[in-house]
Amino acid sequence: MHYGLYGINQNTLGSPEAATAVAKVAEDAGFDSIWVGEHVVLPESLTPPPYMEPTDPILDPIVALSFLAAHTHKILLGTGVIILPQRNPLVLAKELASLDVLSRGRLAFGLGVGYLEPEMRAIGIPMENRGTRSEEYLKAILALWTQPSPVFSGRFVNFDGIQAYPRPVQRPHPPIVIGGRSQAAHRRAIQYGDGWYGFNLNLEETAEQIAGLQKAACNYIRCPGLHELEISVTPRDAINREDARQYGELGVHRLILKLPHNSPINEILTFVRSASISLIAPV
């Protein structure tokens, strides 16, 4: 089992000093990854589930991870997740490749299709067909990263006769992690993903999601070159070693713990150190 931390770009951890301190302690304590979420804007009236308040600060994920890349050495830098249909895929491909270069190959590109209609509307992207748009954007990004002379023709994206350098350090590309609980998300993970990320799941919900992924694996073919799908989950509640063992028995490869990012920095650091002792350190 690998262990990561989620939320290092939010609230208290929007401070450069606080984020740096947590990232360094996490790396030294044996966590394999740090993960950041994304919201460009939030509606003033949130509908459930209220993972964030409208006034909660959250840094741009690529900017935050680029900053933390300069203050760490080996820890994986994960987007969990970028809301793909809200992004221009060519600009995003450049930003992510730049992050992979600057971090010397430590990026994990986690993506989702979004769920907040007011956010999508404010940015100018319709909720309708956001899944189709996201798949096309992902294919366009991979074309820019992997094709000697990138060419793409689709409903939303078209290009040829261009180049986009630098390419990512990781070849053929950084790992693609698909987030989401829907059948469509399961299909995307099976078809295109190196990994799948489930957020805020207890053991029963995790079992249901893995069953959905297994069903999708029976119905869809993975792209050539993809290996076993890596399963990452952020547990809903605090966990101990026995909980971690049960997640592992379900097929989870990585547990990404929610940082208490609304707390003072000393409490967040205590959480990281305590979690490393209770979960990672040898018994």
Image (spheres, rainbow, N blue to C red):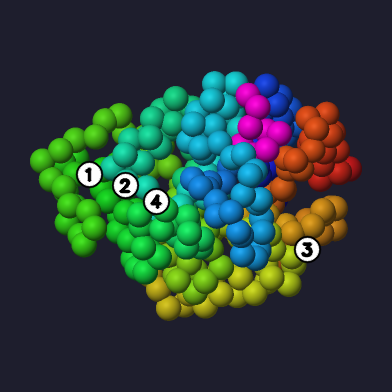
Res 147 label: 1
- Measuring from the top left, give residue 117's x and y in whole percent: 47, 62
Q: Which residue is mark 4?
A: 123
Is 265 left or right of 27, judged from the image as shown?
right
- Measuring from the top left, give residue 259's x and y in whole percent: 73, 43
In the rendered view of the protein, which quadrant contains the C terminus?
A: top right
Q: Earlier in the sequence, mark 2 or mark 4?
A: 2
Res 89 label: 2
Check disc 2: other Cα within 10 Å, few if <14, some if 14-19, many if 20+. Answer: many
- Residue 15 falls inside the magenta stretch: yes
Element at label 2 = helix
Task: Specify the amino acid type for callout 4.
Answer: Ile
Check disc 1: other Cα within 10 Å, few if <14, some if 14-19, many if 20+. Answer: few
Quadrant of the rendered structure where residue 130 is?
bottom left
Residue situated in front as seen by the camera: 242 or 58: 58
Q: Main secondary structure of the magenta part?
A: helix
What is the distance, in whole Å, between disc 4 and disc 1 at their CAs? Answer: 30 Å
What is the distance, in whole Å, between disc 2 and disc 1 at their CAs? Answer: 15 Å
Q: Which residue is mark 3?
A: 246
What is the distance, in whole Å, between disc 4 and disc 3 at their CAs? Answer: 41 Å
Dot in front, 2 or 1: 2
Element at label 4 = helix
User: For the point 59% across and 54% down, which residue is it?
Assistant: 44
The boundaries of the magenta stretch are 9-16
User: For the point 68% across and 33% down, which residue is it?
Assistant: 13
Quadrant of the rendered structure where residue 212 is?
bottom right
Task: Specify the amino acid type for callout 2.
Answer: Pro
- Measuring from the top left, give residue 6's x and y in whole percent: 66, 44
Q: Earlier in the sequence, mark 3 or mark 1?
A: 1
Is 150 left or right of 133, judged from the image as shown?
left
Q: Earlier in the sequence, mark 4 or mark 1?
A: 4
